[in-house]
Amino acid sequence: MSLIRADLAKRFSELAIQGDAIPFYGNKVASEKQFHAWAISSLHVIQAAFGKRSPHSVRFEEELTKVSRGYVSERELNIFRGIFLGAKSDIDGGYLFDFQSAISGEIFGDFVASAKAALDRGEHTVASVLACAALEDSLKRFAAANELNVEDKTMEDIVNALKSKGLVSGSQKGLLAAMPRIRNHAMHANWDKLTPEDAGSVIGFVEQFLLANF
C-alpha cells in the first residue's frame, strides 16, 4: 500500500470511530458540536481522496445543506455515516488507486499529445523533454503502486527495480533500457545528443505503457 493510501486509510478509520461516538440528547438529536466537527473533517478527507465532484463528495455536501439549524436526527446521522462508510469501503478495497490511475493517465496523455505535436513541428528536443517527463513520472507511480520504494531514485534505478520484480518483460525490457540515456540527455540539456528518432521512441513507448497500466 502506498504511503498516501495508507495515511488516508488511517484517517478514514479514525473518523469512522469518531462518527460512531457522536452522542445523542433529548429526542434523539445528535450533539451539534461533535457532529459538525466530524462532518467537516469527513467531507475534507473524502474530497482529498476522491475529488470534489466524486459521488461520495457530492452526496455528502447535499445532505449537509439539508441540515436544519444544526439539528441532526439519528436517521439523518445514519445517512451521513452510510455515505462516509461507502467512501471508506472504496479506500479499504484499493479503488482509490484505480481513480488516481485514471486521472494520471489523462494528465500523462496530455503530455504525450503535446510531445507528438512538438515532434510534428520539428521540435524534437521539446518533444523529448515532454515525453521523458511523462514516462519518468508514470514509471514512478507504477512502481510505487506495486509496493516498490522509488522515492529519490533515478530513472535507471526505477527501471531496474521494475525489471527485478518482473513488472516489465519481453520487448519492454529492451526498449526501457534505452530510456534513461534519452531522459538524461533531455533533462540535462544535452540537445546535440538527441535525435528525432529518440523522441519518437520515447513517445511510442510511453503511449503503450499508459494504455497498458493507466
Image: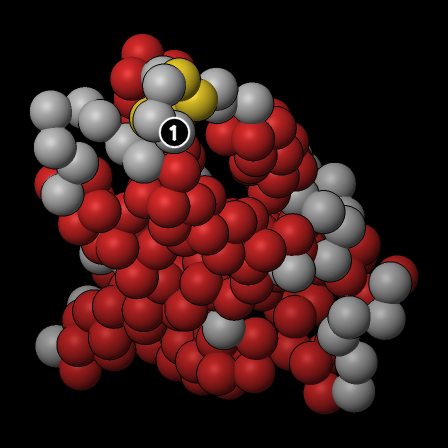
Q: Give, as a three-letter code, the residue at label 1.
A: Lys
Q: At which x and y percent is residue 208? A: 50, 84
Q: Position of residue 180 (x, y in %)?
A: 60, 56
Q: Quadrant of residue 81?
A: top left
Q: Is the residue 11 above or below the residue 83 in the image?
A: above
Left or right of 212 on screen, residue 125: left
Res 53 quadrant in image: bottom left
Q: Nearer the viewer, residue 199 or 142?
A: 142
Rendered position, 203 above or below 95? below
Neighbours of disc 1 within 10 Å: few (<14), some (14-19), many (20+):
few
Left or right: 101 as drawn, with respect to 48: right
- Residue at 79% x, 80% y is 169
78 shown above or below 139: above
Q: Residue at x 72, y 47 (%)?
A: 1
Left or right: 10, with 104 as reference point:
right
Whole-percent x and y of residue 96?
52, 56
The answer to whether residue 153 is seen in the rendering is yes
- What residue is shown at x 69% (from left), y 81% (from top)? 172
**Measuring 12% from the left and 32% from the top, which residue is drawn there?**
68
Q: Nearer the viewer, residue 209 or 103?
A: 103
Residue located beneath label 1 in the image: 28
Which structural element holds mark 1? loop
Q: Percent position (x, y) of residue 52?
A: 24, 48
The quadrant holding residue 42 is: top left
Nearest the eye: 121 or 96: 96
